[in-house]
Image (cartoon, grey):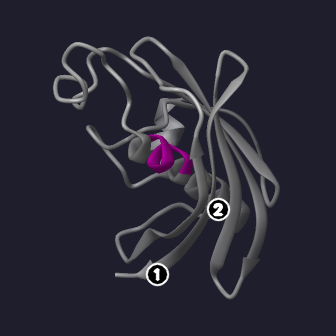
Amino acid sequence: MDIHEVLKSLPHRFPFLLVDRVLDVEANKYIRALKNVSINEPFFPGHFPNHPVMPGVLIVEALAQAAAILSFETLGTTPDKDSVYYLCGIDNTRFKKPVMAGDQLILEVDLIRNMRGIWKYAARAVVDGNVVAETELLCAVRPT
């Protein structure tokens, strides 16, 4: 799924779109997506000027955006103006290594369950084959 398909699958736009490409997705199971971390990211001038590190909350947001694409693929739909995909919970989050400018962040999300419209995922972010962050996410699609 290239950037044009990603834009159809997520309501997010610059500067908050954090998925550049979907490498692999299987509805109701998993997604592997990609975020190229460029020195031109709008957060790097302030985080940190002499040591550009991607904020952990944005790594979690990137994982949640990948999870949203998986949810929409599973539902066989796309986002619309009448609903919002919310991040409802973040559990057991651990950051293992900093993500730096120039890194290629692989977003791996596995669907654990979907019960009564609440989606639960196990998610991890990987750089160069090393897990840099992992978390469990709860998300929901709700009317606006």
- Label 2 sits on what residue type? Ser
Instruction: State which region is magenta.
Output: 59-63
Q: Are marks 1 and 2 in contact (CB under 8 Å)?
A: no
Asked if the magenta segment contains residue 61, the reply would be yes
Q: Quadrant of the N terminus?
A: top right
Q: Is residue 61 left or right of residue 16?
A: right
Q: CA distance from mark 1 to mark 2?
A: 13 Å
Magenta span: chief secondary structure: helix
Is 103 situated above or below 6?
Answer: above
Which residue does the image show at 26% across and 38% down from the upper left? 15
Q: Position of residue 20 (x, y in %)?
A: 49, 30
Residue 43, numbered label = none
Q: Residue 71: x and y, percent?
A: 64, 62
N-terminal of the pair, mark 1 or mark 2, is 2
| Label 2 CA crowd tier, 10 Å (few <14, some 14–19, many 20+) | many
The numbered dot on residue 142 is 1
Labelled disc at residue 71: 2
Please tell me whether mark 1 sits on a helix, a strand or a loop: strand
* Quarter of the image that includes the C terminus: bottom left
Q: Quadrant of residue 136?
A: bottom right
Q: Is residue 31 left or right of residue 118?
A: right
**Residue 104's image quarter?**
top right
Residue shown at 46% from the left, 52% from the top: 10
Three-letter amino acid code at the position of disc 1:
Arg
Q: Position of residue 58 (x, y in %)?
A: 40, 43
Residue at image location 53% in from the left, 39% down from the top: 5
Viewed as shown, does residue 68 lie left or right of 30? left
Instruction: Tell me what residue is drawn at x 22 percent, y 13 percent.
Output: 50
Decide which of 11, 91 is in the foreground and name it: 91
* Mark 2 element type: helix
Q: How many marks?
A: 2
